[in-house]
Amino acid sequence: MSTAFANPAPPNNRPVARFAWFVVFYNILVIVWGALVRASGSGAGCGNRWPLCNGQIVPVSPGFHTIIEFTHRMMVGGSTLLVFALLVWTFRATVKHQAARALAVVSTLLLLNEAFLGALLVKLNYVTGNQSTGRIVLLSIHLGNTLLLLAALTLTARFLFTGQRWADLPLSRRLIGMIEGLVTTIFVGITGSIAALGDTLFPAASLHDSIAQDFATGSPMLLRLRLVHPALALIAAIFALWLATRECYIRARQDDSTESDPGKSSIGVIRAQYGHRMRLANLLLILLGLQFALGIADVLLLAPAWMQLLHLLGADIFWVILVQLATETVWPDAAPSARKA
């Protein structure tokens, strides 16, 4: 699983790096299950006595909504254990000033904040049919924190493979551009969550009614905000397309250079340096097309819960690939070619 997403690690870091990628994908499952809690109306399945579930540590004779919500809490507990284990293992497997250490700490802090925000949603009763502005704001912060957590875990896994140090990070205008593109993508995820909440709370009987809801004067804020999501998605798609096609262009130029001057480099070195990024770029393009297809299907099918979950799963994987490709573009790992030399 890890070899598809990261370059070869130093031998002593490979086990912890593979574990880090397991933590990334486990957290994707936690995120999707959290969406199931919202889509199924199970947010109040354990009541508002967090961390207890209906006043009990383990619910007795739970109903459907309680099972869904309690399972999510247990998954979050598992995620907490995994992230803390990753933090300890990362510090044992790396040395001072390595980027993986800082990202592991950031991941842990974001996870703690994630638990706090989730508990706040429950304690304030921002669940099930709540339509308040407070829920929209807190949900947006929660989703933003979720994507930052996933990005931090992704970078922890990557830097465990590469062993890069902060002192080697190049500061440039390209780095600022990458950050802007990633921030825009975060807002795509936030507005997508708001749109999904609107679809859940205000289901439409037909496609015509769904479109009419978006433009009706008296529509709730949740429905009027739905149009922001596709608009931001188009902007973020331009960034992703540029990033992916840029990698393809660089690879093509490297191949041409090798063919014209075989003594200048070798196919093996080029593959070591660019093969991984090309795989990421191709996968990013595939996922981008898939996300737009799922988004259109979601609208045409009137946003059934299973489609929302599938769309979210694709979005999370897309985010992981995007974060890594953007990072490797501004901060490429020179270790593979150096070790080969």
Image (cartoon, grey):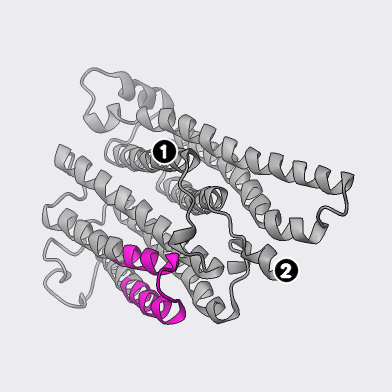
- In the rendering, at what x and y percent does residue 48 appear? 12, 61
Prevailing secondary structure of the magenta residues: helix
Q: Which quadrant would residue 97 be assigned to in this image?
A: bottom left
**Crowdedness near tag 2: few (<14), some (14–19) or many (≥20) residues, C-alpha within 10 Å:** few
Name the front one of labels 1 and 2: 2
Q: Identify the mark at residue 180; answer none if there is no mark.
A: 1
Locate the C terminus by quadrant. Answer: bottom right
- In the rendering, at what x and y percent does residue 315 appear? 47, 47
In the rendered image of this protein, does residue 204 appear above or below residue 158?
A: above
Locate the N terminus by quadrant. Answer: bottom right
- In the rendering, at what x and y percent does residue 245 appear? 65, 38
* Residue 89 lies in the magenta stretch: yes
Q: Can residue 64 be seen in this view?
A: no
Q: Are marks 1 and 2 in contact (CB under 8 Å)?
A: no
Q: Earlier in the sequence, mark 1 or mark 2?
A: 1
Q: Say what secondary structure mark 2 lies in.
A: helix
Left or right of residue 126, residue 224 in this image: right
- The residues colored magenta run 80-108
Of residues 123 and 1, the one nearer the viewer is 1
- In the rendering, at what x and y percent does residue 27 appear? 40, 64
* Residue 106 lies in the magenta stretch: yes
Q: Say what secondary structure mark 1 lies in.
A: helix
**Amino acid, disc 2:** Lys
User: Which residue has dot 2 on it?
Assistant: 340
Q: Identify the mark at residue 327; answer none if there is no mark.
A: none
User: What residue do we see at 50% from left, 65% from top?
Assistant: 159
**Amino acid, disc 1:** Glu
